[in-house]
Image (cartoon, coloured by chain):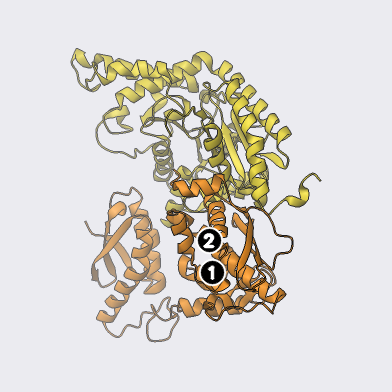
Chain colours: A orange, B yellow
């Protein structure tokens, strides 16, 4: 069900300032066909070199993308650049009454288009001063030159979507998808935001490869290890399917597990046991482990 | 939006309940409330009603009444069939299915995959068809069950399930088909096939929501999903949803009497609408396998514009209810997995709209769609930054 405010519907059905400006001072071109939304924003500055005289747009996208773009043009009209750079995507959402959570990216796209237009303007007309209060993201560094993707865009994509690999970043914002030169830089950004899990996190301190190492100093250390694997690997995966499990006891090589949630009533639970939990414990702790179901 | 005349062309999503179906159900919601399992004569009406509904369903599918298991929905039937096969096909663990199945199958398979069952998702070509060489290569002595939908819900592409069931059996595997979209639209006679399980859902053919069928071929090994009472010959526990089963039986009777005319009717409407849109809206094309397609389904790609915006205009301008594979219409912001599997280019992927007809649609409905569509396409194309170079000068 669509949950759009009347104002969103109004701007969608009667979009303001549609079109192009032939002698625009700055053009912001963001988004693409792959993602399903894109926007081109044309900005014309008045003779005072400060005031936004005219704004027009074209948008490919859903109702909220069109409404966000239309709202943005109304908001920018007549403002000075200095005033305009203070807008955030939330201001677009507020202007429209509200946007559904899943559609907030439409307002983000609007702001990105304006930022891109300002940058473009600065390249075309270095004589038009950029305001001193320019937020940081306006002076962004381009990481992927093939697709013009900036550091902030990548950071935002990684943070918002909990991305962990360069490939995921490419899927989300195209960065790294063409020549691939920037993949190292993207990895660095990911590492800053999501520190790589130390490879030894689950391994024994003996520095052997984690699989097959059974050199536990004490039985306690061994149980700790099993508990660790259980909490960090087994349970999060089961939880994805609304299931869960608890570690009941460890007796030598026998690990007693109780399945909870959906898993408890799942007809294939025995296979979950044998093939999956056991395999993980084999890989991470010891080949000798046998998983048994606690009733 | 009150008092708006609705043009409902989203019948692959659900259908209007037939008035005859409601009439048949009513007495069972009021007078005949007895439990069909009880022994006194007061329960004879509901018990007989279920028996007769079972007979009607069997006749519609060309099978024996004993092979019909009433369930709550298509998803339950799918779950039961797949899980049953994995539990009974000892020594075989693999599932072979397609990348374009309904989420009822796809998400079930992904879930089972995590539990250690290998799954092969067969890809499709640009028309949504399977490559039979890949099918042969995928099904082997480890395959417990092959599950391929009869007709795709988004494009209407029909799969060769009779042939696929043969291949599955040659390899000792069971065969299941999700026939939710094809009932009453593609005739089938199950006893002439090797299909082991077939799932269907009542609300796709004018029965109420909340009732489905699992066809289980006689002698196909079986393990119930719901365990409890002995209803449905101990194949599906739970007191029968009597009223809905009566409704389902009536809906089957209506198809037995009129499916041929209905198929001709929806095909005629679909074809006129499709030809009309292709002629009046530039840069559009039809998705799917036009040779083998459900008679009432049309999936049209409107290039350079976005599906949700089209749908919203269709509803706002003319009360038309359709659906789209656009990313923006899904909660996940992911475009249709079916159209993606077909390798549809992105400028068409997001602008694909599905129209699906039923016996209650009329020529006037098509007139309304044809009158509304060109204006909507033009409005949105005028807004779009793409595709301008293709415009007629």
> CA gap, disc 2 to disc 1?
8 Å
Relative image position of residue A124 (x, y in whole percent): 72, 74
What's the mark number on residue A84? 1
Which part of the image, by quadrant, shows the N terminus of chain A?
top left
Quadrant in which residue B26 is drawn: top left
Element type at mark 2: helix
Q: Name the residue nearer the viewer: B148 or A281.
A: B148
Give the chain letter at badge 2.
Answer: A
Q: Name the residue nearer the viewer: A143 or B174.
A: A143
Give the chain letter at badge 1.
Answer: A
Marks 2 and 1 belong to one chain? yes
Which part of the image, by quadrant, shows the C terminus of chain A?
bottom left
Relative image position of residue B233 (x, y in whole percent): 31, 28
Q: Name the residue nearer the viewer: A161 or B320.
A: B320
Q: Name the residue nearer the viewer: B93 or B22.
A: B22
- In the picture of the structure, the residue carrying the numbered disc 2 is A75
* Picture residue at 57% right of the left edge, 17% below the top: B260
């Amino acid at each position: 069900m669509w949950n759009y405010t009347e104002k969103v519907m109004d701007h969608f059905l009667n979009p303001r300032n549609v079109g192009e400006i032939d002698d625009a001072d700055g053009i912001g071109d963001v988004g693409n066909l792959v993602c399903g939304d894109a926007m081109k924003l044309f900005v014309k500055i008045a003779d005072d070199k400060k005031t936004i005289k005219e704004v027009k747009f074209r948008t490919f996208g859903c109702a909220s993308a069109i409404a966000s773009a239309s709202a943005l043009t109304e908001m920018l009209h007549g403002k000075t650049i200095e005033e305009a750079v203070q807008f955030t995507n939330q201001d677009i959402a507020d202007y429209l009454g509200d946007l559904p959570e899943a559609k907030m990216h439409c307002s983000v796209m609007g702001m990105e288009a304006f930022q891109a237009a300002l940058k473009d303007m600065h390249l075309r007309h270095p004589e038009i001063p950029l305001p001193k209060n320019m937020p940081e993201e306006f002076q962004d560094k381009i990481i992927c030159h093939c697709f013009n993707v900036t550091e902030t865009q990548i950071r935002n994509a990684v943070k918002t979507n909990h991305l962990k690999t360069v490939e995921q970043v490419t899927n989300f914002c195209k960065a790294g998808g063409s020549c691939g030169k920037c993949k190292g830089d993207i990895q660095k950004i990911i590492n800053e935001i999501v520190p790589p899990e130390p490879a030894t996190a689950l391994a024994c301190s003996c520095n052997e490869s984690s699989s097959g190492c059974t050199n536990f100093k004490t039985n306690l250390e061994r149980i700790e290890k099993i508990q660790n694997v259980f909490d960090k690997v087994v349970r999060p995966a089961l939880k994805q399917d609304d299931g869960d499990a608890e570690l009941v006891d460890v007796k030598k090589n026998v690990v007693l597990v109780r399945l909870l949630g959906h898993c408890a009533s799942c007809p294939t639970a025995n296979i979950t046991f044998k093939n999956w939990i056991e395999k993980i414990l084999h890989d991470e702790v010891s080949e000798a482990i046998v998983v048994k179901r606690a009733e | 939006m009150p008092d708006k005349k609705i043009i409902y062309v989203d019948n692959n999503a659900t259908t209007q309940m037939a008035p005859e179906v409601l009439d048949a159900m009513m007495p069972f919601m009021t007078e005949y409330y007895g439990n069909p399992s009880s022994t006194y004569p007061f329960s004879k009406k509901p018990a007989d009603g279920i028996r007769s509904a079972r007979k009607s369903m069997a006749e519609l599918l060309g099978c024996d009444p004993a092979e019909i298991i009433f369930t709550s929905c298509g998803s339950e039937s799918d779950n039961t069939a797949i899980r049953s096969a994995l539990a009974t096909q000892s020594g075989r663990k693999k599932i072979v299915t397609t990348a374009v199945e309904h989420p009822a199958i796809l998400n079930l398979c992904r879930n089972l995959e995590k539990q250690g069952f290998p799954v092969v998702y067969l890809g499709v070509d640009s028309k949504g068809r399977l490559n039979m060489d890949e099918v042969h290569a995928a099904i082997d002595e480890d395959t417990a069950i092959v599950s391929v939908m009869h007709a795709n819900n988004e494009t209407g592409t029909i799969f060769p399930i009779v042939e696929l069931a043969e291949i599955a059996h040659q390899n000792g595997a069971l065969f299941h088909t999700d026939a939710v979209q094809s009932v009453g639209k593609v005739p089938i006679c199950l006893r002439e096939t090797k299909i082991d399980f077939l799932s269907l859902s009542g609300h796709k053919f004018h029965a109420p929501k909340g009732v489905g069928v699992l066809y289980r071929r006689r002698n196909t090994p079986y393990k119930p999903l719901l365990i409890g009472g002995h209803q449905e010959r101990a194949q599906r526990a739970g007191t029968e949803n009597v009223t809905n089963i009566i409704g389902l039986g009536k809906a089957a009777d209506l198809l037995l009497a009129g499916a041929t005319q209905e198929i001709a009717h929806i095909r005629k409407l679909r074809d006129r609408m499709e030809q009309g849109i292709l002629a009046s809206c530039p840069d559009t094309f039809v998705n799917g396998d036009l040779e083998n397609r459900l008679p009432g389904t049309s999936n049209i790609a409107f290039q350079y514009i976005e599906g949700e915006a089209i749908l919203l205009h269709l509803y706002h301008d003319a009360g038309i209810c359709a659906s789209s594979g656009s990313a923006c219409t899904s909660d996940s912001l992911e475009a249709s997995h079916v159209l993606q599997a077909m390798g549809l280019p992105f400028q068409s992927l997001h602008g694909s709209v599905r129209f699906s007809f039923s016996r209650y649609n009329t020529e006037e409905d098509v007139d309304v769609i044809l009158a509304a569509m060109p204006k909507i396409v033009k409005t949105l194309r005028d807004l779009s930054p793409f595709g301008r170079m293709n415009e007629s000068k």
